[in-house]
Image: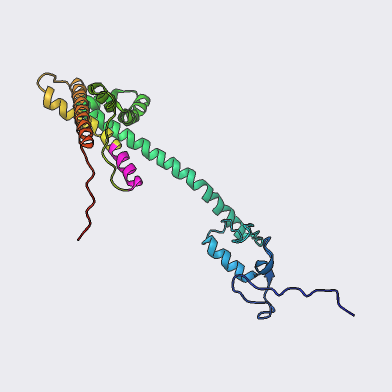
Amino acid sequence: MVSMTSEQPRRYCWVCFASEDEDEEAAWVQPCRCRGSTRWVHQTCLQRWIDEKQGGQSGVRVTCPQCGTAYVLQWPPAGGAAALLELLDEGVGRTCPFLAGILLLASLYWSAVTYGALTVLQVLGPRDGLLWLEQGDPLLVLVALPSIPTALLLGRALPWDRCLHNLLSHQPGHNQVVEAEPVGPPAVTAARGASRLVLGALALPTAATLTGRLLFRRLLPTGLTRTLLGGLVFILLKGVLRAFLARQRRQRRSRRKVLDFRTEL
């Protein structure tokens, strides 16, 4: 009599490549939709493989490298103090990003307040600046001071120098500012541009104060008017110099040429 039952294929672990004959007591699992030789795997081998993929982060989703099925992991229930600690740890992990963001915003705000106060003392002078800070409305002061670096950064971000270059340029088709050739990777170039923008904006009150003292000290003894005129002169001078530099870059680019290739002997 011929048996109608077919033999079940031998199981092989796709992690350690061992068969079921080598370790009969090992636990096997079929965790995904794979068929054939990659269908079965040792429970312990798969656990080690999952630990390596998660890298210590138990919440990382791990999938089968063949069919892409996500492995379903069943954790034993935690009781007593362990469950309480797990809940506490999860709550701390969720609230820490929000607390860090609040601390970062608070640090930026008070840094802006400090910079605004120093700018007021620098522009108005120590005596008039302290008088304005002491006699001013506290709420208004706390709002006005951080608006100083904000306004400087926004003003620095405006392309006013390009508009000035367009007004000074009389050649048709050459009304765009030619920037310097970027050197280095794009990330480094972007970091340099951002740092230059921030430092240029925050250094404007100091440059305006020094320019006003240098040019208008005898004509205008008061600090505010002198600083405003000094800032205007500094901005116009900087724009003219940058337009001149852009014109020189454009002329040099129009006269550049490609050299012949020479083989090394």
Q: Is residue 169 above or below residue 256?
A: above
Q: Position of residue 121 (x, y in %)?
A: 23, 29
Task: Determine the residue positioned at 40% across, 42% down.
Answer: 104
Quarter of the view holding residue 89: bottom right
Q: Position of residue 219 (x, y in %)?
A: 11, 18
Q: Nearer the viewer, residue 5 or 161?
A: 5
User: Is residue 231 shown in magenta?
Assistant: no
Q: Nearer the viewer, residue 106 or 160?
A: 160
- The answer, for residue 133, to whether it is visible in the render is no
Task: Determine the residue positioned at 49% across, 47% down.
Answer: 96
- Most prominent secondary structure in the magenta stretch? helix
| Segment colored magenta | 185-196
Q: Position of residue 258 (x, y in %)?
A: 23, 44
Q: Nearer the viewer, residue 74 or 129?
A: 74
- The answer, for residue 147, to whether it is visible in the render is yes
User: Is residue 192 shown in magenta?
Assistant: yes
Split into 4 quadrants, where in the image is the C terminus? bottom left
**Is 217 placed left or right of 29 in the picture?**
left
